[in-house]
Amino acid sequence: MSAKKTPQPIRPYGDRKDDGRIQLSFTLPVAVSGRAKEAARLFCEGLGLKNVVVATMESAGNEFSFFVAYGNADVPLDFAQIVVPEVELPAWGFKEINHLIHEKIGRKLVVVGACTGSDAHTVGIDAILNMKGYAGDKGLEAYPWIDAYNLGAQVDNLALLTRAKELSADAILVSQIMTQRDLHIDNSRQLIDLAKKSGQRNLLFLLGGPRIDHKLARELGFDAGFGPGTKPSQVASYILSTLLKR
Ligand code: B12
């Protein structure tokens, strides 16, 4: 039986600790006016906020107004009860990773990455794969014991799986930056469905991007998810440690 956790109640911090005061911003499809401001206030009250102050109202193009408002939210949270899956990975560096692949696996690891679907934002996947890397952390192309293939932008899911098969890849790295109309969700799910059909779901599937976290990636059928600030060595550590556990 798991031990009962000591409750840790928290509330938003505005002016004073636990005052529950929050700030929010939004746009309404009406021109700036006294009525628009009142609409914004009523909207916040409708959300359950008390003591609402609409601090900013600015024109955001024809017939649109942008608002910043403050209010008190009476939503208690017990932080002790919040459980979120997080990627488990060792804090290995470049040298250690290469050494371990050499010693324990005895061949180069093969990873194939792409920015998939209609998404053309390649900077994230480049940061992980390209020689230069990210934030002073070398990219996977720089690892002598990793063969990294960067397929670039707008890669079709089927083309990615086909290339991974040709290269006998250990891991597939997918970058999804665009989230409009949940594009990233549909596209990522489709990749996993296709991988199941083509018998490739035994490969490691990693999903990354600014709106991706481990929980979402797991829900979409991936092995792990990586968000903003991810460093290439973390990705290499995850891939290697997971393969070693298998
Ligand atoms: C640069 C940029 C562009 C460039 C892209 C150039 C290129 N070659 O990549 C250009 C000008 C082409 C562009 C176009 C568009 N863009 Co743009 N773009 C951006 C911008 C300014 C920066 C993105 C970026 O490079 N971030 C830096 C990288 C390093 O960060 P990252 O991607 O988060 O990557 C890190 C992690 O997430 C993680 N990671 C990422 N991928 C992966 C994958 C794996 C496997 C792993 C492990 C980790 C990982 O590791 C990385 C390093 O830590 C953002 C706004 C912003 N400030 O974020 C908008 C933004 C992403 N773009 C946006 C939009 C709307 C568009 C366009 C639709 C605009 C238009 N109307 O044409 C088009 C769409 C083009 C398309 N088909 O995809 C929106 C997206 C909104 C949304 N909710 O989807 C943003 C957020 C701007 C905004 N606020 O509206 N864009």
Image: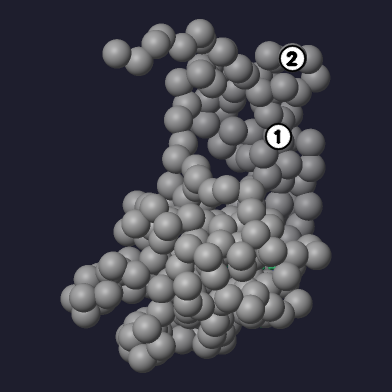
Q: How many marks?
A: 2
> Which residue ends up furthest to the front in the rendered image?
103
Q: Which mark is residue 23?
A: 1
Are dots 1 and 2 in contact, CB under 8 Å? no
| Label 2 Cα neighbours within 10 Å, binned few <14 / some 14-19 / many ≥20 | few
Quadrant in which the N terminus appears: top left
Image quarter of residue 190: bottom left
Q: For ligand 1, which image quadrant applies?
A: bottom right
Say which of 241 and 78 sits in front. 241
Q: Is residue 24 visible?
A: yes
Residue located 41% across and 9% down the image:
4
Residue 158 or residue 3, whichever sits in front? 3
Looking at numbered disc 1 in the image, what kind of residue is underneath it? Gln
Residue at mark 2: 17
* Quarter of the figure with the C terminus: bottom left
Residue 12: image location, x then y, percent: 66, 23
Dot 2: element: loop
Dot 1, how many residues are within 10 Å of its Cα: few (below 14), some (14-19), or many (20+)?
A: some
Query: Which badge, 1 or 2, comes first in the chain's sequence?
Result: 2
Residue at x-position 68% and y-position 73%: 139
Q: Circle 1 sits in a helix, a strand or a loop, which is it?
A: strand
Residue lying at 76% horizontally and 77% vertically, measured from the top left? 132
